[in-house]
Amino acid sequence: MKIDAPWLRDKPLSDLLAVLDRDGEEARVVGGAVRNTLLGLPHGDIDIATTALPAEVTRRAHSAGFKVVPTGFDHGTVTVVIDGRPFEVTTLREDVETFGRHATVRFGRDWKRDAERRDFTMNALSVSADGTVHDYVGGLADLRARRVRFIGDAATRIAEDYLRILRFFRFHAYYGEGHPDADGLHAAIITRAGLEQLSRERVRMELMKLMLAPHAVPALAVMAECGLLGPVLGGVPHLASFSNMAKVETACGLAPDATRRLGALGVWVTEDAERLWQRLRLSNAEHERLAVMGTAWWRASPAMGEDAARRLIYRIGPQYFTDRMLLAWTRADASAHDPTWRALAMTPERWTAPAFPLRAADFIARGVEKGPVLGAALARAEAVWIAEGFPLERKTLDEIINHTMGG
């Protein structure tokens, strides 16, 4: 079959294919761009496979005036950069020996063998420059059925790289429909001990992508039922809270946020944030967000009122405030369209906390000496300023200074 993919004819991709797909060598676009185009989705990154060896790819690209970066030369991959746009070009390969993600491969010229070493049938499709789609493993049928299916024996493919367990659920959450493929699910269950062999960074990367998938809720539910989600998180998953978080984000017009959704799924108290930080090697910023979400979220409700909400925004900042309010909302007895909860969570949209307007110089000018006394006076003044509703009028500020100077 052929597809009408205008991006195949667009420069600079068409120029690169013209350079590689001639003089006895063949080049095609492979993987996600083909899959997404067939599903009517944005094609995303464009990767190219070729029969040409890396040295030949480099020679041809340089001859055409393109920049070449040897990103994985020994494993057959170079990145060709044209007008600032990168394209990953990989020579056809076949596995000689597999041991996790560090397989021994040799270069080849057989498109079928190259396709058979990939993970899922929908990712093994390739397309020539003229739009001809090549399918060696039943990927087209699986795409039509919205079925994420391993190529060959599922357990064998997972043993090659145990991250494929998480990828199986992530791809199903993005592209699948109905229940996950039975063979793939069975293989994921019987090989789940292999997840412990993975680096925390790789698990984090895959899990954060899953957080944003359109059908993440049912995929996570199946993972939990099969005993796969608890070990990844190192704790009890809160699926209802995660499901509600996706709903309230939509109700508030907020973009899906992987860190916020991870908090809904895995954080009940601040100790949970610490555990996820260590278990998933989260960034310091991600850890801080989760820790603030887990701090006294149960005290948040529309009953706290506008003044209390503003004081909290001033203390922890607008993003942390929204994170915590949304988390509390997901665990409250309220719908995702509750107007009072929405008004609370979106308080930062209608009010911006001012900076504390008083400085040490204001107190020094009135005779307060530098040191602990000055610090205490500033702290008292800030507390009074917050309690009085963040006034900015000079007269009121002078009154606050006079009131707090003496302790």
Image: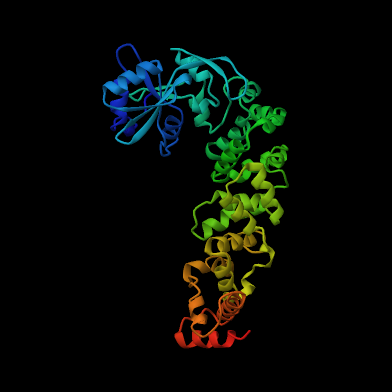
Specify whether residue 177 is in view: no
Specify whether residue 393 is in view: yes
Q: Is residue 265 above or below residue 26?
A: below
Q: Is residue 128 left or right of residue 212?
A: left
Q: Position of residue 220 (x, y in %)?
A: 64, 42
Q: Is residue 129 above or below residue 253?
A: above
Quarter of the image for residue 25 reads: top left
136 or 82: nearer the viewer:
82
At x 53%, y 33%, the residue is 146
122 or 260: nearer the viewer:
260
160 or 188: nearer the viewer:
160
Quarter of the image for residue 310 reads: bottom right
Quadrant where the C terminus sits is bottom right
Quadrant where the N terminus sits is top left
Q: Is residue 379 left or right of residue 359?
A: right
Q: Position of residue 70 (x, y in %)?
A: 41, 25
Q: Position of residue 156 (x, y in %)?
A: 64, 21
Quarter of the image for residue 245 reads: bottom right
Q: Is residue 210 left or right of residue 3?
A: right
Q: Position of residue 233 (x, y in %)?
A: 68, 43
Q: Is residue 215 above or below residue 54?
A: below
